[in-house]
Amino acid sequence: MDHQNTPLFTALKKHAAGNPVQFHIPGHKKGLGTDKEFREFIGDNALSIDLINIAPLDDLHQPTGVIEEAQKLAADAFGADYTFFSVQGTSGAIMTMILSVCSPGDKIIVPRNIHKSVMSAIIFAGAKPVFVSPAQDTNLGIDHGITTSSVGRALKRHPDAKAVVVINPTYFGVSANLKEIVELAHSFHVPVLVDEAHGVHIHFHDKLPMSAMQAGADMAATSVHKLGGSMTQSSILNLNTKNGYVNPQRVQTIISMLTTTSTSYLLLASLDTSRRNLALHGHEMAEEAMKLANYVRDEINQIPGLYCFGREILGGEATYDHDPTKVTIHVRHLSITGYETENWLREHYNIEVELSDMYNILCLITPGDTQETADILLTALRELSQINYTEDHAGELVVKVPEIPQLSLIPRDAFYAETEVIPFKESAGRIIAEFIYVYPPGIPILLPGEVISQDNIDYIVDHVEVGLPVKGPEDRYIQNVKVIIEADPIF
């Protein structure tokens, strides 16, 4: 296929150039009816293609024209049989995957460190999650992925599972042996669904972890906006139908149910053009980003008190491969938290990082970075070390890893159960009816249906007290929590 073509973007430009008289939404009509300051800032070109699903521009809900052509080009670029564009982000694509294969009561094998969108879909489907514990790195205080052996144990115990969900790669760039997991799951006739939110670029370079489609997975939700150059909220859903586990018509129906009928053509156009860029230049872009990231990593590891892991951590089942463009900087030896580091970088160097947790910050090196941006980060980190590093590490933070709670109710049943609100610090032993998670990355600490332990309470309170973004409960300050009402026994 000719990847120079951008059928959707080209059609949008042609339509705008014709300067049609518009009696349809959006009501700003090429920017004429919008706020003046906003129009001047955004620009008339962008506003001229902020259009709706009129006939010349196709319809994402039932594409037969330029959107269909653009999706076919994307499928070819990513080695998929079908590709669906998502304007609901990767969260929408992930939910589509799960709702396409799960019905009420069905089992689905998932890592415990999944994104909250996975659990949202499980609640909507009424499915039963079978949790597989991720491999924990107690030195860095992060989770890696699930292993082939743990997936094997889950499949032997639950051979009736409707799917296995795998994260590839993790937020921190680490991958398990995805191809091996796929082959194992398929031997049980179970499809594999991949959360590939942080791996849009891995398909285009053989020195990066294997992509979901290369590994033979059945579906993969991929964030083009995170590292592939498209606009925020634009993602794709790739399908591999060769094994017969996925029905593309069913997937189209589900993604349409989850998608607004007022789809953003700006987002869709950015997917079309980003596909072109990746298909034509993806290898070169990934090569340059890796080269710059490895330079940053090497320099960071020369700075006292800082550590940035690379391929030296590989060799375990959960640490099979690594994406070096994810630069995870461990700050525990500076006796400060990642959250404090994030704030210091913002205040002193105008640097914004991808995320911070208790012990780390994460910086993404992408084709949008240069030697100049890399050196600004390194200059800032050297100064941070000079201020905070001491030889004896006297005040060094101790890594705490939360225990994984016990699931006692199907999440849907817990979410819709009769509930009461009680003080969070007094909730040990109760069944929670809402989510508590840190975003980013959006991995839940507690899920609806899990039993709250004192360890969970202490861990969450520690995060709240240092200012980390703990979210999810209706009480945004986490003073109270919603739990299942437990009826008194009848004697």
Image (cartoon, rainbow, N blue to C red):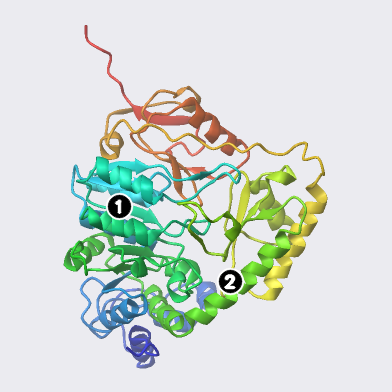
The residue located at (31%, 66%) in the rendering is 216
The residue that disc 1 covers is 164
Q: Are marks 2 and 1 in contact (CB under 8 Å)?
A: no
Q: Is residue 155 above or below residue 325?
A: above
Q: Is residue 47 above or below residue 420?
A: below
Label 1 environment density (alpha carbons within 10 Å; few <14, some 14–19, many ≥20): many
- Which element is circle 1 on? strand
Give left or right: position of 281 versus 359: left
Q: Nearer the viewer, residue 22 or 202?
A: 202
Label 2 environment density (alpha carbons within 10 Å; few <14, some 14–19, many ≥20): many
> In the image, which disc is placed on residue 62?
none
In the picture, residue 311 is in which quadrant?
Answer: bottom right
Q: Position of residue 64 (x, y in %)?
A: 20, 81
Q: Position of residue 343 (x, y in %)?
A: 68, 51
Q: Nearer the viewer, residue 448 or 3?
A: 3
Give left or right: position of 365 versus 6: right
Q: Nearer the viewer, residue 57 or 218?
A: 218
The residue located at (40%, 79%) in the rendering is 275
The quarter in which the N terminus is drawn is bottom left
Q: Which amino acid type corresponds to the residue marked 2 in the rendered image?
A: Met
Q: Position of residue 293 (x, y in %)?
A: 62, 68
The residue that disc 2 covers is 290
In the displayed orientation, state which residue is furthest to the front. Answer: 315
Q: Which amino acid type corresponds to the residue marked 1 in the rendered image?
A: Val
Give left or right: position of 57 versus 378: left
